[in-house]
Image (tube, rainbow, N blue to C red):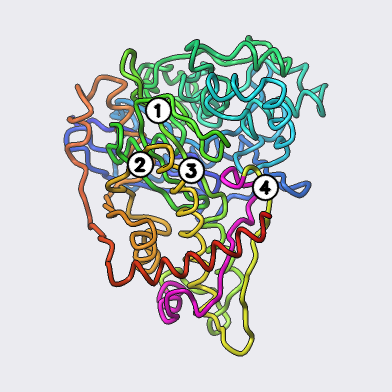
Amino acid sequence: MKKYLLGYDLGSSSIKASLIDAATGQSVASAQSPAEEMPMLAVHAGWAEQDPEMWWEHAQKSLQACLKKSGASGADIAAIGISYQMHGLVCVDKDQKVLRPSIIWCDSRAVDIGRSAFQSLGADYSLKHLLNSPGNFTASKLKWVKDNEPAVFERIHKVMLPGDYLAMKLTGDIVTTASGLSEGMFWDYAAGTPSEKLLSLYGIPASMLATQVPTFSIHGKVTKVMAQQLSLKEGTPVSYRAGDQPNNAFSLNVLNAGETAATAGTSGVIYSVTDKNAYDPKSRVNTFIHVNDNKPVKSNGVLLCINGTGILNSWLRKQARGNGSLYEYDQINKIAAEAPIGADGLSVLPFGNGAERVLEDKNLDASFHGLNFNRHGQSHVFRAAQEGIVFALKYGFDVLQGMGLNTKVIRAGHANMFLSPLFRETFVNTIGAPLELYDTDGAKGAALGAGVGAGVFGSFEEAFRGLKIIRTEQPSPALMGQYKNAYQTWLTHLQKAIA
């Protein structure tokens, strides 16, 4: 009898599901729902919300599509893993009903709350205990609800991250992980427990937090009702969950100090693993507990996030037309490659998706610089956008290197912006490190994590025996100098913008 593992990747644009053959570690089917992007609610500037019930609807659809594609029986799924968009806030009452839309990762309404908390707690406490400023993370978003929606706050039974919500729908259990609590900025690294001091400052009762379980363990089991509704087997364990960036690193077998993963979807991330409680004094990058943290061996991930990444490319695609219809992304990539390195002096600051942590929570909005109506055309705009995204990642990458996280190679899934040859060329020659691309994604990584958590795999090595490298991109000395000059031009524009 075949045995399968199911992985979910709950993103802000879609819900992806992947079925993995447990015997080989290979994907047998994958699907996403919806086909186009899920909407974000933006009632005010800087806000971003989504309805968790929408996530659940598309989680069901993506699972059914996987089962139909593969011909597999849901009864043969041995375990379920969940990856999810980080830093979101889901509030439910005692009946597990959602009380308000989820305030998601790119919502910047709580920036001032986090900044005030950093001053009240003091830099010494915040950096040594939280390894970050409280910032615009889940805890600060919950404080915003307390201050601005007191009637909602009074009804809250538990607060969760998006992945916790999806697991709750499957199992009826409300649990989370230490990694999840750290990404919400609830974790005290010195004490090894949720931060009593931050909870007290924000007036948040510890009872609102979900029960903590190990990342790789049985988090709950599919209920009879959900089993019947989804054609699964009652009692199927949910045995892994992690935020999308720790999970992306896991899916690429990035588990040891010095190893680095990258993504370039809606947002762009570089995530380096360290065995230290490392922090940036300005909190421009963020440290979270990695999936394989296991005392006494410490494993943390330091995360650089650029909010305005693939969303910029997506925005440009929606504005541009070729013969009256939208371009496909591969057409955009080919057109962009027609322009020279540096886009003939045109630079794009890609910060149009909310406050940017790497810019100390400034919200600059996106902007074009050096645009000349007589010189620049579509190819220059498309190229400058892709270069601008990479240059923003380079700006943050230098912060990581300044913390002593010496990266020798970067691993990424062969997806999203990394499908663009121009983006890959710009990336390796600007960052200055080789890039390894693998045939994996967040949903597949979550499925493999579920296999580890349920004991289907006896080790990480066994889980990753099917991980395949697709290609390696190397920096070119002949190109690195040209990209360095283009980056310096871009950096001059950024420094003027943030001055």
The local secondary structure at tag 4 comes to loop
Amino acid carrying mark 3 in the image = Leu
The local secondary structure at tag 2 comes to strand
Amino acid carrying mark 2 in the image = Ser
Image height of 233 relative to 448, above or below: above
Q: Mark 3 or mark 4, which is nearer the start of the sequence?
A: 3
The residue that label 2 is drawn on is 18
Label 4 and label 3: CA atoms lie apart by: 15 Å
Residue drawn at x 56%, y 83% as measured from the top left:
376
Q: Mark 1 or mark 4, which is nearer the start of the sequence?
A: 1
Q: Give the number of the mark in front: 3 or 2.
A: 3
Q: Give the number of the mark in front: 4 or 2.
A: 4
The residue that label 4 is drawn on is 362
The x, y position of residue 324, in whole percent, is 58, 82
Residue 260 appears in which quarter of the rendering?
A: top left
Disc 1 + disc 2, Cβ < 8 Å: no
Mark drawn on residue 300: 1
Label 4 and label 2: CA atoms lie apart by: 37 Å
The local secondary structure at tag 3 comes to strand
Q: Closer to the camera, 195 or 359?
A: 359
Q: How many marks?
A: 4
Image height of 452 relative to 334, above or below: above
Q: Residues within 10 Å of mark 1 (few under 14, many from 20)?
A: many
Label 3 and label 2: CA atoms lie apart by: 27 Å
Query: Relative to residue 292, is residue 174 drawn left or right?
Result: right
Q: Residues within 10 Å of mark 2 (few under 14, many from 20)?
A: many
The x, y position of residue 353, in whole percent, is 63, 52
Which residues are the magenta region? 331-359
Is residue 355 in the magenta section? yes
Is residue 49 in the magenta section? no
Amino acid carrying mark 4 in the image = Lys
The residue that label 3 is drawn on is 304
